[in-house]
Image (cartoon, rainbow, N blue to C red):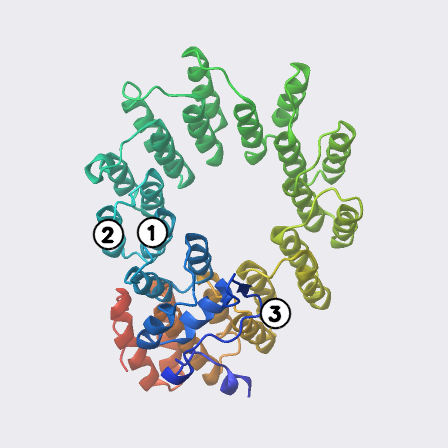
Amino acid sequence: MFQKRFRFHLLPLSKKHAQFPLPRNAVTLSDGVQQPSDATIANLVLKSDPVTLSEALSKPTIQWAPELVNQVLKRLWNHGPKALQFFKHLDRHPSYIHCASSFDHAIDIAARMHDYNAAWALVGRMRSLRRGPTPRTFAILAERYAANGKPHRAVRTFISMHEHGCRQDLNSFNTVLDVLCKSRRVEMAHTLLKTFRSRFKLDCVSYNIIANGYCLIKRTPMALQVLKEMVQRGINPTMVTYNTLLKGYFRSNQIKEAWEFYLEMKKRKCEIDVVTYTTVIHGFGVAGEVKKSRRVFDEMVKEGVAPSVATCNALIQVLCKKDSVENAVVVFEEMLRKGLCAPNVVTYNVVIRGFCHVGDMERALGFMGRMGEHGLRASVQTYNVVIRYFCDAGEIEKGLEMFEKMRDEPCLPNLDTYNVLISAMFLRKKSEDLVVAGKLLMEMVDRGFLPRKFTFNRVLNGLVITGNQDFAKEILRMQSRCGRVVRRLKL
């Protein structure tokens, strides 16, 4: 049975074996010693216990540099506790000192896990080493607070910058406005702009951010009002301004207004750029106007504006969703043949999702295998798409096999991966499937993800109903670690 061979926990290596294996993509240093790759180091961190890890990271054969450390932290992104363990072990290294960007990565990981005490402790450590904090540090904290439903804390973080030795300026102010707008707290951002208008000399970027915020929540009249105020204050609009409003019309499904605005831009001899064309192509496509999307794409090429990979991705996505995946593949192959632009992970993900949507999993997996041709590797989003469609089709074993393949890459699963698989475990209402759901729940908590109360309750109820009370009690004891209080259960 598949579940019996399903590996849920990576076993720590013994001290004897906690050495670096010969890495496939290692760098050979000038003295002939091979430098382990970021992938090799990340794999070692995942498999080592704290004692062997500390010893391994102190080896003189490793030449630590900010770029290498940052790449390792990025690979460990979806295993927050291990990423922070790696960072803290290296913080005790006798000769290497973390740079500001590495601290920022670690702070971001801690804040994503809702461990704000750890995040601020890192800010303090950063300051003690004279590595910061920098405006980017506070931008990261503000963004995490806003994303976690704490917009007022985001604003307070900006206001307190000077207390940590970091001066506030227009760029940092624009950043906090952007953070609030992207978390849909547009009115709060607009109020903040008015409050600090006398302190900072606002520029076009400030107003563009607020206008874009109103466009995000489909309030284009307010966006127009903001831009009108900008002009009244003697600030000239830019192409970013026009593209923002154009995208706002399309997002609000004001297709006629969007087209008229686009024609007006051309009439006024605005320098229509690749962003403008991409916006129109995607906007028409989402509205189901596939032929118009294609005509604008052809017009763009004719006008000598080189399409970016984002443009090609927009057209391919439109064809997958509103036309046919076969026509999308034609554009994909044409993109390669004519050298319009090199595909990226998003390009492949769009095509793979298109094949999954029509149930052609074989070709979806085939495209996944082609990613290496362009020096790409499947991302967690790639795997999530395939796993979701396998599970939706009732092919749970194949979904779990893809999950296992992620481990072999290694490509660490994220919150979406776990949520998709846990939900799938309830489809067949089998006792063994609910045990798998419980193990997945424990693993996601162990990796620093915070499940919803609904997820905890659902898994616990399922285990109780299927006679797995002992396992339910184990999960009930564990849940206190992540602050999720489940409703009272009779076990």
Badge 1 vs badge 2, beta-carbon distance below 8 Å:
yes
Residue 362 x %, y %: 72, 68
Type of amino acid under label 2 = Arg
Crowdedness near tag 1: few (<14), some (14–19) or many (≥20) residues, C-alpha within 10 Å:
many
Crowdedness near tag 3: few (<14), some (14–19) or many (≥20) residues, C-alpha within 10 Å:
many
Instruction: Tell me the quarter of the image containing the C terminus.
Output: bottom left
* Label 1 or label 2, whichever comes before in sequence order: 1
Residue 292 got which mark? Answer: none
Mark 2 = which residue?
A: 125
Q: How much space separates mark 3 and mark 1, taking CA atoms? A: 39 Å
Crowdedness near tag 2: few (<14), some (14–19) or many (≥20) residues, C-alpha within 10 Å:
some
**Above or below, 269 relative to 256:** above
Type of amino acid under label 3 = Phe
* Label 3 or label 1, whichever comes before in sequence order: 1
Front-most of 182 and 112? 112
Q: Residue furthest front?
A: 31
Residue 390 got which mark? Answer: 3
Q: Secondary structure at mark 3?
A: helix
Q: How much space separates mark 1 and mark 2, taking CA atoms? A: 9 Å
Residue 103 got which mark? Answer: 1
